[in-house]
Image (tube, helix red, strand yellow):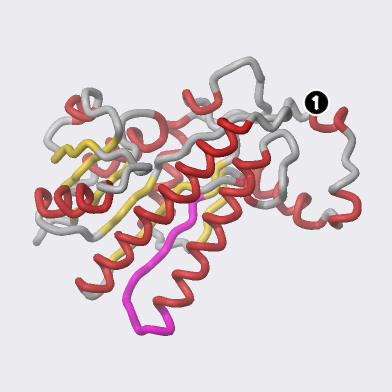
Amino acid sequence: MEKKRAIVIGASSGIGREVARLLIAEGWTLGVAARRTDLLQTLGDVQVEQIDVTSEDATSRLRTLINKVGGMDLFFYASGIGKQNRELVEGIELATMQTNALGFTRMIGEAYRYFAEQGGGHIAAISSIAGTKGLGPAPAYSATKALQNVYLQALEQQAHSRGLKIRFTDIRPGFVDTALLAGDFRYPMMLKPERVAKEIVRAINDKCHIRVIDWKYRLLTAVWRGIPNCVWRRIPRCVWRRMKL
C-alpha cells in the first residue's frame, strides 16, 4: 500500500510538533516546515524546508517541500501568533494580521490550489475558539481567528460547488500550554499540547469539519454564541479579569 503523505507547517514546537510526531507514528510520510529548522531535524525521518509564512516565497517553498515528499494528501497548518493587546500597540496588531491573516491565506490558498490540480486532498488547520466572538483583550488575534474560521468555511463551500474532492477540518482549541501563551498572564483551563494533538489527529482521521477542543470549551463557546451582541459589548473588565483575560 502506498504511504500517505502529509505536510505540517509550524512543526518546530507546540501543537504542530506533537501532531507531526503522531502522524509519523501512524506511518505517514512527512514533510515539515517552520521558520526555524534546527528543531525540525530532531523529528526523525522527515523532509525539511524553511518556510516563513509572512514571506512572499513561502508558496514556492511549500511546492518544493511537496516535491521532496513526493506529493501531498494532507496539509496541516499550525502556524500562528497572538498576544493580549489592551493598549492596541500598533506593532502587535499588524504583526498578528501579517501572520494570522495574510500568512494563513497565502498557505491555505496554495494547498487548495495544489489539491485542485491533483484531484483532491485534506486541509486541516488550527484556528481557535477566539474566533467565536470579538475578545476585547486580544482584538487582532480574535479577529484573525474569525477570518480563519470563515475562510475555511468559504473554501469548503467553493470546493463542493466545483466538484473538488477537498476535505476541510477546522481545529479550534481552547488555551493550550505552549510558548504562544507564555508571559505575564495566567490562563484558565489550560490544555496540554500532547492531549490536544491526539484529539486533532483523531479529528483528521474521522474527517471532522469543525472540532472544538475540548468539552469544556465546547460548552464555553456555546454560551458565548448565545450572548446577544448588545450584552457582549458591555461585558465589564472585571469579567475578563476573572477569566484571566
Residue at x 57%, y 49% (from the top left corner):
145
Who's the residue at 56% across and 56% down the image?
A: 147
Task: List the residue tagged with mark 1.
Answer: 241
Reply yes or no: does residue 9 show up in magenta. no
Residue occupying image coordinates x 66% and y 25%: 187
| Amino acid under disc 1 | Arg
From the viewer's perspective, is 57 left or right of 104? left
Q: Is residue 118 left or right of residue 103?
A: left
Query: Residue at left 11%, top 54%?
Result: 67
SS state under label 1: helix
78 or 57, nearer to the observer: 57
Q: Is 84 situated above or below 158?
A: above
Query: What is the x, y in percent for residue 213?
Result: 55, 45
Give the extent of the magenta segment.
Answer: 160-171
Q: Quadrant of residue 35?
A: top left
| Relative horizontal placement of residue 11, taking residue 184 as reference (left or right) | left
Above-or-below relation of 221 to 196:
below
Q: Position of residue 237 (x, y in %)?
A: 86, 31
- Above or below residue 81? Residue 147 is below
Q: Where does residue 170 sit, x and y in percent of width and height?
A: 48, 56
Say above or below: 60 vs 93: below
